[in-house]
Amino acid sequence: MLQLPLWFEIGTFVVLGVILIADLLLVLKRPHEPSMKEAGLWVGFYVTLALIFAALMYIFTGHEHGTQFLAGWITEYSLSIDNLFVFIVIMARFSVPRKYQQEVLMVGIIIALVLRGIFILLGAVVIERYSFVFYIFGAFLLWTAYKQATDDGEDEAGENPLIGRLRKVIPMTEHYDGGKLRTTVDGKRLFTPMLVVFVTIGLTDLMFAFDSIPAIFGLTQSPFIVFTANIFALMGLRQLYFLLGGLMERLIYLKHGLSIILGFIGVKLIFHAMHVNEVPFINGGEHIEWAPEINTFVSLAIILGVIVIATVASLLSPKGKAAQASSELRAAFEHYERAHEEYAATEAERAKALEQPEFRAAAGELVSRYDRAVTVDENPRVNVEFPETSPNDPRSLKEIVGALKEHGVTASDAKAASSRSDKETASAPARQPGNGSHAAH
């Protein structure tokens, strides 16, 4: 196992600890929904920080360590992006106010770092003592790669049985009270749905760790490199959530790219297990000399190449554009419905409500997303999903948008939507929207 200078490891953890604490305090002090510009700057900051750290590793610990970190960080970052799909589902399912989603993600990241730290220490001990575990890790990653490629993702929205049991056992309110875990209702101290959200995020990342930890151990056996790669990958995840947003739906080939990466690392692990083989019933317990040891630079090139190809193919694909249009339209319609309930409960109130900047912004956003979805849907090779309207509203989505246009609402009104995050109520109900079918527009 590769050894790094002790001073370098201690210094790294001190600096990263200070950054994480400062980031947490910033989120708790000023909860808000970051703009695209703010999220982009933070993502750029953490990516730059990771690259600087890789350069420092090249300088102070050697090119092999630096390359292993880069390969591990890129792999973990790619697999963490896959987490965002599920995080988006969780936030929508529990109707977490956008203003407090940063706090939820930050707490989730801290939980993830603790759990992954434990996993990494255990994994390092097992690998050090039992080389045959590489066979197990390799086979597991090959199985995970197959599941990743064939899974349709429909079960991701289902509630974990443990969460359902938690709801029944712990006294809980139906509404949020800012970012608080507990609140007082009629003189009784009750938990808010925020507790369930934290537990759900933590359990979700725990499940993803079963894939990612064996994957990075296929690139390096240094616990320090494994853990720092995880830290840098997770630190930028919160801002990436807000930066990508609806774009996540467009990356339709990402899961196939991740499947290839996991499969490649699985094969690499099995080759390594053969190279250091000590299992008695395999080659008489002797090393299998012909088994290749795949170079770290080759691993890095393959991982980068697969990610670039999967991303470019997704962005150029008409199906990717349709998926993104469907996702953005669904989000815009849900936002409009919430604003409609608050500002325009009746038809008579709608015209007056459109004078309110927040409601007009939501209406403009819906008009903008609907028009774009209709344009994308004109392509005969794709099918955009148009959300069903509420049972309380007999009109179709097309009729709702048409009525808004008659009142002078245009796509340009959506520009005011960026101001809504500071206006959004912190007491939004933790409703669980159904998985209803989609109707034609």
Image (spheres, rainbow, N blue to C red):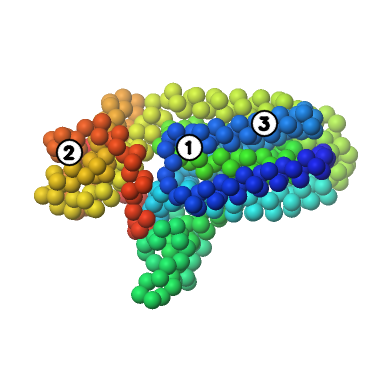
Determine if residue 312 is in view.
Answer: yes
The residue beneath circle 3 is: 52
Left or right relative to 54: residue 105:
left
Which quadrant holds residue 260? top right
Q: Residue at x 36, y 31 (%)?
A: 322
Instruction: State how far apart marks 1 and 2 are (Cα).
Output: 31 Å
**Of the pair 128 and 131, the residue shown nearer to us:** 128
Residue 9, horizontal then vertical, whole percent: 76, 43
Residue type (three-letter) at the residue carrying disc 3: Ile
Circle 1 or circle 2, nearest the eye: 1
The residue beneath circle 2 is: 404
Residue type (three-letter) at the residue carrying disc 1: Ala
Q: Which quarter of the figure is the C terminus placed in?
A: top left
Is mark 3 in CB contact (under 8 Å) with mark 1? Answer: no
Circle 2 or circle 3, nearest the eye: 3
Callout 2 crowding tier (Cα within 10 Å): few <14, some 14–19, many ≥20: some
Q: Which quarter of the figure is the N terminus placed in?
A: top right
Which quadrant holds residue 177? bottom left
Label 2: which secondary element: helix
Which quadrant holds residue 356? top left
Instruction: State how far apart marks 2 and 3 are (Cα).
Output: 50 Å
Q: Earlier in the sequence, mark 2 or mark 3?
A: 3
Label 3: which secondary element: helix
Is mark 2 in CB contact (under 8 Å) with mark 3? Answer: no
